Amino acid sequence: MKTMETRRFNRHANMNSEVRSEILQIICELASLAISTKSTENMLYGFFDGYDSTEKIIFSNELAVITHANPELAAKISTVCGLIEKYPTEYC
């Protein structure tokens, strides 16, 4: 079984204000759902610190539950993850 590692990227060099705003909007919308989304919310907040957890989000059971509850919101999450995973890796 493949383990999913959390990749790092330079948020300051790659993420623009539009993407930051979209992430915050998604987090607010997740809070309004009547289901637990803490894991996804935490990983979305991690984007602001340069942690790329896109694989973990996309393949999570939580995203499947979000998709069932709000397909439009799940599509927004997938779109943001698609942008983030294209950012170059930062080597520490």
Image (cartoon, helix red, strand yellow):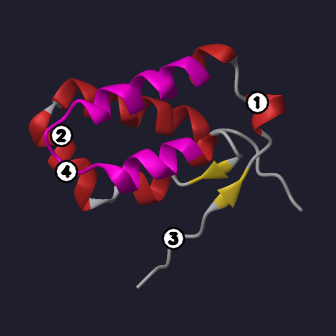
Amino acid tagged 2:
Thr
Does the magenta stretch mainly form a helix, a strand or a loop?
A: helix
C-alpha distance separating marks 3 and 1: 22 Å
Q: x%, y% of residue 76?
A: 36, 27
Residue 4's mark? 3
Instruction: Tell which circle, 4 or 1, labels the residue nearer the N-terminal end.
Output: 1
Amino acid tagged 3:
Met
Q: Secondary structure at mark 4?
A: helix
Quarter assignment of residue 28: top left
Name the residue beneath numbered marker 2: 67
Amino acid tagged 1:
Asn
**Vertically, is 6 above or below 43?**
below
Q: Secondary structure at mark 2?
A: helix
Instruction: Say if mark 3 contacts mark 1, CB within 8 Å.
Output: no
- Residue at 80 percent across and 42 percent down: it is 10
Name the residue beneath numbered marker 4: 64
Magenta range is 20-45
- Near mark 4 (Cα within 10 A), the count class, few <14, some 14-19 or many ≥20, is some
**Which quarter of the image is occupied by the C terminus?**
bottom right
C-alpha distance separating marks 1 and 2: 28 Å
Name the residue beneath numbered marker 1: 14
- Residue at 25 percent across and 55 percent down: it is 62
Q: x%, y% of residue 48?
A: 66, 39
Instruction: Say if mark 3 contacts mark 4, CB within 8 Å.
Output: no
Q: Which residue ends up furthest to the right in the rendered image?
A: 92
Instruction: Tell which circle, 3 or 4, labels the residue nearer the N-terminal end.
Output: 3
- Residue at 53 percent across and 55 percent down: it is 53
Instruction: Tell which circle, 1 or 2, labels the residue nearer the N-terminal end.
Output: 1
- Between 29 and 15, which is closer to the camera in this rendering? 29
C-alpha distance separating marks 3 and 4: 18 Å
